[in-house]
Amino acid sequence: MHKNPSKTVDEALHNFSGDWVDVNRKYLTGMEHLLSMRDIEVDNSPKTEVFREDKVRLFHYEPVGEQTCRVPLLISYALVNRYYMMDLQSDRSLIGNLLRGGLDIYIIDWGYPSKMDQFLTMEDYIQGYLNNCVDFVRGETGHDAINLLGVCQGGTFSTIYTALNPDKIKNLVCMVAPIDFRSEDGLLNIWAQDIDVDSLVDTYGVVPGWFMNYGFLMLKPFQLIIDKYVSMLDIMHDREALSNFVRMEKWIFDSPGQAGETIRKFIKDLYQGNKLIKGELEIGGERVDLKMLTCPLLNIYGTKDHLVPPECSRPLTDLVGSKDTEAMELPIGHIGMYVSSKSQKVLAPRIVSWLTERSATAPAPQKAKTNAKTKAAAKHASAPRADNAKPRPGSSRK
Amino acid sequence: MSEEQQGKGGDPLGQWLQFWQASADNWQRAVGQTASNPAAGVPDWLNPADSWKQWTEKWGQAMGQAQGGPIFGAAMPGAAADTLGRMAPGSELFLQMGQRWLQAVLESAAKGPGGAGEMLSPDSLQEMQAVWQQQLAKFAESAAMQPFGPAASTWMGGVMNLSALGQTVGGRLSVPWGDAARDLGVAWQQALRGDHEALREFTKTWKETYNKTYGKLLQAPMLGSGREPQERLMRSLDAYVDYLAAIHEFTTALEKVGRQAGGRWIAKVQDLSTGGAIPSHRTIYRLFLSTFEENYAEVFRSKEYSVLQARMVDAGLRFKRRLDGALEDVLEALPVPTDSEMKELYQAFYELRRTVKQQQRRIDELERLVAKGQ
């Protein structure tokens, strides 16, 4: 690799030729690796499906070691990508680190909405599916209030949910959650102002994942469409690095469609209307007042986040009614929040300690209140590992 | 059959060939004689009426000579000459109309600023049209129409009115293009020389002209029992054109940014090369990425880009909706449910499921109350 300037044309050509041969050698070795790759393993931490409603599934991770945090943690990821980003590979797994920190973790898989789900509203997701998952964990563990970790759009949903159901949430952690949608730097925020979301939803019903991806790729087109693959040539010879690249690639383009009515409201009321921080947002006829969110809040965001710029997340700390709030600003981007080595060293330990401290005073769990229906869900749990398959058809609550 | 007849008809193929040879000779004589006929202000080859008249006379004579032959003479004695004799004045009538048109072309060309070179300009075409109508009006009153009586003059006048009306209706489709032709041509030529504003202007003018002409045609109400699907098809076609124009406008804007970024990138590479140092290809590539990314990011943040992108997306969505509608017309004839029908079903299912869940929650609540003894 030659990065320094050459003094003569001969020298420059010599350097270029050497690099060209080197890159091609890496490319051919990498092709060998790609041809011998079979399944792309993601989502490695063992877990069990414990609850299902329509296409939404709730998983419970197998605890690792002693559980130091008394209150279980429910993770709500965004609808736009898959939850396994937090457990993409074993050596860089936020979930793995949280489990090793002693947390008892449940996670929601929102599934892949089909056209049949186009009428699902934000109310259905927040006061329906999310609430039922919260209730399930409460019933299963005997805790009246549980810890909730919302990521990205899932953070927005979790914030709204906690404001509407303050008694059910003991502590709230928000990661890279858009709350204030007014931003002069966020391209998504700028572009969303002019998008005719009615036309979009009326045309597609369920807004396709590729459409969302187009928007994400256009945020940094040269980096995400060109340089990513050019840079891949430098690591292709390294099987492990290439596997990590392919895993990330799988996650990025494993994009569920968006239920039309939900994204209609999300864009109109939040991106365009910024109603959440104005106190004008209504979910199921109920106004969302952030001052009603009174539980302890840990607000985490990245200063280099181009999807959810820090100014979109930062205000939450001061907008809620909580007396115990903490902002955690990390010099990383949106994706780096889950997979960067920096986040692995800092983020998981801080979440564990913050939750553990605030869960110590929780009352002892009552006898588990889970009814027969939810028990049946556990009995009919799916295979505990590597849940890569798309949801099975059917929508029964087992 | 008499001997004479047998003698004449003994070699039909030979006689047939002789007939065509004589016809060809006469044709050549006719052309030769008419080609030398000068007409004031009009070249020989542009004066077909006289040529045609002379040619038909000669041809008639040739056919008259051939009448005695086995084909026309025996089968249709006198028919060829009579028929030609009747055809000639009729064809002459139309040829005189053509001649009037030619006269109009030449007159307007003579008036135009650039002479014949400007004949196809919108102004010249309109001028020609006007002159032609005047010429036709004169013709309608001329002696040429007299043998056909006053009814023919009336009919001719009617035709002329219809022609003018047809011209007005047809002009809705063609005149805006004629008006825009000069701007489009100039913009296109400038665009070919790399002027991207001109390319954008070309697209804009083209789309505006389309909206005034064929766009209106595609949006016009259809008639008949199939009007609904036809309208959907036409609307989808119109939406497709709209989408293509929006894509073109969008990519033109991006391309302009790309050219600016390219210029800045080259300048940066040149800066690095001062003092004889040759930057590495990796450095050049990194500079390319950072320069282009910065330039595009700057544009992406602008309101103009956001609007342009939204317009393109919306044009694409509108096209998809209309195409879907047209496709459903086709699907309706097949034993498969359409998207609209399924949508109704999904909505009914969604509402039903929601009701069931609400009732389930109420039942659960009641069960809890019963369990507590309340």
Image: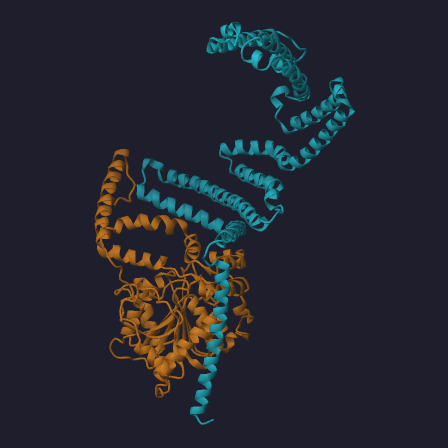
Is residue B148 positioned above or below A386 on the image? above
Q: Residue furthest right?
A: B150
Q: Say left or right for A226 vs B254.
A: left
The C terminus of chain A, quarter of image: bottom left
Query: Where residue A107 appears, x then y in whole percent?
Result: 35, 72
Query: Where residue A182 appears, x then y in whole percent?
Result: 52, 62
Of B307 and B70, the residue lying toward us: B70
The N terminus of chain A, quarter of image: top left
Query: Where residue A28 appears, x then y in whole percent?
Result: 22, 46
Q: Say left or right for A139 vs B123.
A: left
Q: Residue furthest front?
A: B1
Q: Quadrant of residue A384?
A: bottom left
Q: Say left or right for A182 vs A22.
A: right
Q: Quadrant of residue B169?
A: top right
Residue lying at 35% horizontally and 82% vertically, measured from the top left: A140
> Number of marks in the image?
0
Of A68 and A330, the residue lying toward us: A68
* Colour cyan maps to chain: B
Q: Is residue A318 visible?
A: no
Query: Where residue A332 appears, x then y in whole percent?
Result: 37, 61
Is residue B26 positioned above or below A168 on the image? above
Q: Residue furthest bottom?
A: B373
* Colour orange maps to chain: A
Of A234 and B178, the residue lying toward us: B178
Q: How is the rendered protein coloured?
A: by chain
Q: Say left or right for B86 vs B299.
A: right
Q: Is residue B370 visible?
A: yes
Is residue B365 positioned above or below A305 on the image? below
